[in-house]
Amino acid sequence: MASEKLNIPNLKDLTMDNITENVNLINSQTLDPRLKYVLERLVSHMHDFARETRLSTKEWMAGIEFLTAVGKKCTDVRQEFILLSDTLGLSLLVDSIDHPKPSSSTEGTVLGPYHTHDAQAQILGSAISDDPDGEPLLCLCTVRTTSGKPISGAKIDIWETDSKGSYDVQYEDYSGEKPDGRAVLISDDEGVFWFKAIVPVPYSIPHDGPVGKMLKSLGRHPWRPSHMHFMFEKAGFDHLITALYLRNDPYETSDAVFGVKSSLVVDLGTVTPEHVKKYDVKEGTKLLTYDFVLVTDEETNKLREQKAKEAMEKLGRPNMKIVEGLPIPMEDVD
Amino acid sequence: MASEKLNIPNLKDLTMDNITENVNLINSQTLDPRLKYVLERLVSHMHDFARETRLSTKEWMAGIEFLTAVGKKCTDVRQEFILLSDTLGLSLLVDSIDHPKPSSSTEGTVLGPYHTHDAQAQILGSAISDDPDGEPLLCLCTVRTTSGKPISGAKIDIWETDSKGSYDVQYEDYSGEKPDGRAVLISDDEGVFWFKAIVPVPYSIPHDGPVGKMLKSLGRHPWRPSHMHFMFEKAGFDHLITALYLRNDPYETSDAVFGVKSSLVVDLGTVTPEHVKKYDVKEGTKLLTYDFVLVTDEETNKLREQKAKEAMEKLGRPNMKIVEGLPIPMEDVD
């Protein structure tokens, strides 16, 4: 038994100075070394947070009540904890850790809480939005490798709001049967995928719940700049979760969830007469073009491991092992 | 406007290396300097946690789902977030920070999630438990100052489980109208308070929810050693939240919520013939005696501030101010 090796502590007379090491010691009974490491860092940071702020019982209770309200606000179509993670920058951070990108590839950004699995597979050229009030937008995109080779057969999940700034799932009568502003496309042999959408608009993240209250007390607005989400999947390549943002949006530099990156900001054009004929769109239709670049799993794994090693060295625990892509201090590996 | 002084960042191109300072900068728009400091430490620790563990998207999502489940489990009579805080040692830590005790006083311990405001004021000598299966226990206690002077008129809130290890609120048909195992007493002119209760038994914290699952994955049991809760309130004295534990309980050194302190562990005695007559109890009744010692607000505040100063120095931010008893770095005070 692995437990025989453990030094189970005598959990008595715990004080603000010795509680952390003892909680970590009792938690180290887990047989999962990665869970042990994650919990050890979690407990250590949570305790240091309380010690450094001298967290009062009243503040602690306010925190308990806040987290409870966040949980209560969650439904099948509203994930308030993801909103909380988004608005505190954790989502962007986790994406950048899990999906490191070489400079030659398309950057990732926050997934947000509105991706669903309702979108239907559609053929190239489909109109993904049924909103008659949206400004039509022709989207001509490609997906390639870092060396410029077209990637065919990539699955591309696309989602955007309607012209009022709401995703389909945000409507009370949404049933999942008629998704709108969503599609799943497959890139063709030239790595091309194209579709008809509407020009994205800014929208505020839901702020009628506890996260909205938090933003208000912090003097922050709840707006996201106009954007369209894209998620790419193709065997052998790292999952890419990203979005394109419109230049000169009023919230371009103050996104409530920290998602904007210069390389993902685009200028919309206008279709040419050739486009009008070829893609069957009206004159004057807005045009979005973008060439996405995916990274191979191999390249991503290498980069992720290299950054994990650097982080463990910085933490003073260079003696580590990568298990299933994630670092574990050597002392925790059997 | 205070905001004119702020350097609102350009929130674009945020990476794993610069996201933290930028989130903290945008949060610093709050006009509440204590909130600013607490959020700064919270965001910094949360981000460092993700960076040090190289938290994966899958693990992040498991965390989101865990917290959501914890929130969903909360009801008026079940506070799963408090259980989570208790089982990760945060509750004990916050109590020890907020209620520092000089060595001459009674130590505090975790409040737990079962205190209610349903308990009725009762006269000294009342029986607080209606459980016919409980082993009768006579409790003779006093409450005094650190210099030994009796404290009269202290409000003492007492709560314990029944003989099956369940608090009244844990029963499905509990309405709040007939609290059991609870009382609020007032100490008399000699600082004495006495009552009839039942001998406490060990019980497991609720483990049919997400916190129970967490304990299981960590190889931990959910048991608390036999104890009785006490909460003291008296103007001029620091609120004392504590409990007494029975010596040689099987869980004395492995309390699931880290509450046991040697000074709070008691040996039960048996009543004398004099007790039988004076307190109208049966021969052989178990006896619990304890002399509680409260600390003045003044003493507590002084100790709390001293420890806050030490913590801020340790953090490398000695230039601080105490506002309403809590530390704020000077750079954040207008």
Image (spheres, coloured by chain):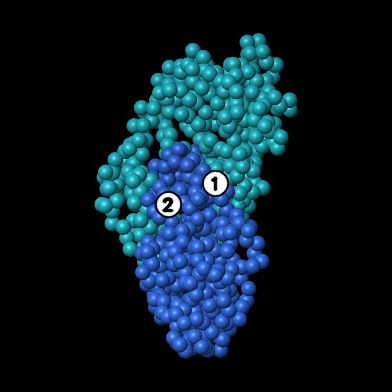
Chain colours: A cyan, B blue
Residue at 50% x, 50% y is B208
Query: Measuring 67% from the left and 32% from the top, which residue is drawn there?
Result: A175
The answer to which quarter of the image holds residue B184 is bottom right
Quadrant housing the C terminus of chain B: bottom right
Q: Amino acid at mark 1?
A: Thr
Mark 1 → mark 2, Cα distance in angstroms: 17 Å
Q: Is residue A103 above or below residue B133?
A: above
Compared with residue A114, is residue A281 higher up or lower down, i.e. above or below?
A: above
Q: In the picture, which quadrant includes the N terminus of chain B?
A: bottom right
Spot occupied by residue A207 in the image (x, y as percentages of width and height): 65, 46
Residue ranking furthest to the right: A133
Residue A137 horizontal side relative to residue B27, left or right: right
Q: Are marks 1 and 2 on the same chain?
A: yes
From the viewer's perspective, tell me whether residue A125 is left or right of residue A303: right
Tag shown at residue B215: 2
Q: Is residue A161 above or below residue B261?
A: above
> Residue tagged by mark 1?
B68
- Residue B56's quadrant in the figure? top left
* Count of numbered tags: 2
Mark 1 is surrounded, within 10 Å at the Cα level, by few (under 14), some (14 to 19) or many (20 or more) other residues, namely many
Amino acid carrying mark 2 in the image: Leu
Could you tell me residue B292's position as x and y percent?
47, 80
Q: Earlier in the sequence, mark 1 or mark 2?
A: 1
* Cβ–Cβ under 8 Å for marks 1 and 2: no
Q: Is residue B206 left or right of residue B216?
A: right
Q: State the SS at label 1.
A: helix
Of residue A193 and residue A115, the one placed in the foreground of this image is A115
Determine the residue located farthest toward the front in the rendered image: B283
Q: Nearer the viewer, residue A37 or B262?
A: B262
